[in-house]
């Protein structure tokens, strides 16, 4: 436990990673990380940023907000973070078998994982091209709870060791995270994921239409855009391959309900 040069929390600012942050702040999981790093796609709902403001004001672990650019602007421009001519977001398309399928997904890596690792390199004082492997050893805490254990994957970076305190140190389910936050007087965060994330379900967007009309309209704007931006395939936010604006008032059983559990990088929705 003492051979790490740096410990960080990969902070998504949703329920699980916020719980992990406050557990470390309270000393219930130790040793206390040096920093928490929030990779900002610049397309999170307003409540994510409000939660970050609260954590920065009341928490004892410094939070670094870093970004690889505006994912929404890149979607609108039809490029990814490197300027390549495809969207990094896995919107729904018609597959070769005629059924719905997710498109190519690189947004988590380009706008989350790689951003966190670059900030770690900066904190270590590494310059471009300097090797970290064999020189530094970093522990990265990720807020995956017991009910999403399938998302836990080891780091692809040999100099970074991933730790999942909500699986092994203090095993907790999402509901238990909420209960712990309530007992300790902390706010319950809402889900962290981009406004137009195709892993959100129809029921969630239906609730937005009722309670968050501004966010719903922004999601609809992007949904309209991805079918008028000259892409080879018609893309949709919803798995039903129907425009978001045409979603029924009371959508049927949601086929996207468990998709965040399939987002195996463990960086979104936590």
Image: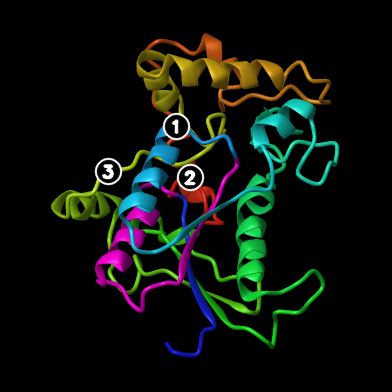
> Residue 218 or 93: which is nearer the viewer?
218
State the residue position of label 1: 46
The tag on residue 260 is: 2
Using a 10 Å C-alpha cutoff, classify the residue at mark 2 as few (fewer than 14 neighbours), some (14 to 19) or many (20 or more): many
Q: Residue at x 42, y 69 (%)?
A: 164
Q: Residue at x 55, y 71 (%)?
A: 154
Which is more N-terminal, label 3 or label 1? Answer: 1
Disc 3, SS: loop
Report, in whole angstroms, how far the alpha carbon at label 2 lies from the one at label 3: 19 Å
Q: Quadrant of residue 213?
A: top left
Using a 10 Å C-alpha cutoff, classify the residue at mark 1 as few (fewer than 14 neighbours), some (14 to 19) or many (20 or more): few
> Residue 242 or 137: which is nearer the viewer?
137
Can residue 146 be seen in this snapshot? Answer: no
State the residue position of label 3: 188
188 to the left or right of 138: left
Tell me residue 8's x, y (percent). Answer: 49, 68
Q: Which residues are magenta?
A: 13-41
Report, in whole angstroms, how far the alpha carbon at label 1 lies from the one at label 3: 14 Å
Residue, far front: 57
């Amino acid at each position: 436990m003492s051979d790490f040069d740096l410990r960080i929390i990969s902070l998504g600012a949703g329920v699980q990673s916020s719980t992990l942050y406050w557990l470390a702040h309270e000393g219930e999981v130790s040793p206390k990380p040096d920093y928490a790093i929030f990779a900002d796609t610049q397309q999170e709902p307003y409540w994510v940023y409000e939660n970050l403001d609260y954590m920065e004001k009341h928490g004892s672990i410094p939070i670094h907000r870093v970004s690889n650019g505006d994912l929404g602007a890149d979607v609108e421009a039809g490029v990814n973070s490197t300027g390549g001519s495809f969207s990094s977001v896995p919107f729904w398309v018609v597959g070769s078998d005629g059924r719905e399928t997710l498109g190519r997904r690189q947004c988590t890596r380009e706008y989350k994982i790689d951003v966190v690792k670059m900030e770690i390199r900066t904190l270590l004082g590494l310059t471009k091209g300097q090797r970290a492997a064999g020189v530094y050893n970093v522990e990265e805490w990720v807020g995956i709870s017991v009910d999403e254990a399938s998302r836990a994957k080891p780091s692809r970076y040999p100099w970074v060791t991933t730790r999942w305190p909500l699986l092994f140190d203090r095993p907790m389910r999402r509901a238990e995270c909420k209960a712990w936050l309530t007992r300790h007087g902390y706010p319950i965060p809402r889900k962290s994921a981009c406004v137009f994330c195709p892993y959100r379900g129809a029921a969630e967007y239906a609730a937005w239409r009722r309670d968050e009309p501004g966010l719903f309209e922004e999601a609809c704007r992007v949904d309209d855009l991805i079918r008028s931006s000259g892409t080879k395939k018609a893309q949709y936010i919803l798995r039903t391959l129907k425009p978001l604006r045409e979603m029924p008032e009371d959508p049927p059983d949601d086929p996207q309900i468990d998709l965040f559990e399939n987002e195996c990088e463990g960086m979104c929705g936590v």
